Image (cartoon, rainbow, N blue to C red):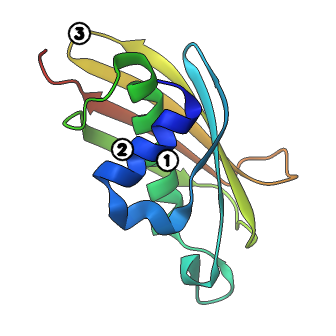
Amino acid sequence: MQAAELEAFLKEVFPEVESYRFRVLDLSAGHITVSIQTQERHLRPGGTVSGPTMFTLADCTAYMLLLAHIGKVALAVTTNLNINFLAKPEPGELIAKAKLLKFGKRLAVSEISIYSAGNEMPVAHATTTYSIPPR
């Protein structure tokens, strides 16, 4: 799947995440870069981006990376997601960079680093495992 197809498919199968307005910035074999523009609803008290927002970005980025390799398989599901919050992200654009660590017949493992736009240090780091349904 290509970038525009991934964005459209995500909106189709998970309309509840449409408010994030995911944009695929880069896509290549084993890698994807996705961004969101945070809104007021994505902030927690204190004016920082909420943990659930970064969790959603990590999970959806890993899902789109997997779909880029297996096609439109809505029933690929998260079996594990571990996230470490490293720094306080500022409101604005968040960028997730993911790479596929393992791509097997039944499982795919990815690593995701999330950045505040313009910052070289990650604000969060996640690993995900997805279950790939039998064909």
Residue positioned 40% across, 53% down in the render: 11
User: What secondary structure is marked by label 2?
Assistant: strand
Q: Can you give x and y, in whole percent of width and height, for residue 85 in the image?
A: 57, 57
Looking at this view, name the residue that lies furthest to the left: 134
Q: Does residue 121 appear anywhere in the picture?
A: yes
Residue that badge 1 annotates: 58
Residue positioned 15% across, 24% down in the render: 133
Q: Amino acid at mark 1?
A: Ala
- The vertical placement of 72 against 77, above or below, is above
Q: Quadrant of residue 39?
A: bottom right
Judge left or right: residue 122 versus residue 134.
right
Q: Does residue 82 appear anywhere in the picture?
A: no
Neighbourhood count class around disc 2 (C-alpha, 10 Å): few under 14, some 14–19, many 20 upward: some
Neighbourhood count class around disc 3 (C-alpha, 10 Å): few under 14, some 14–19, many 20 upward: few
Which of the marked residues, 2 or 3, is nearer the chain's N terminus?
2
Residue that badge 2 annotates: 81
Residue that badge 3 annotates: 105
Between marks 1 and 2, how big is the CA–CA gap?
Answer: 9 Å
Q: Amino acid at mark 3?
A: Lys
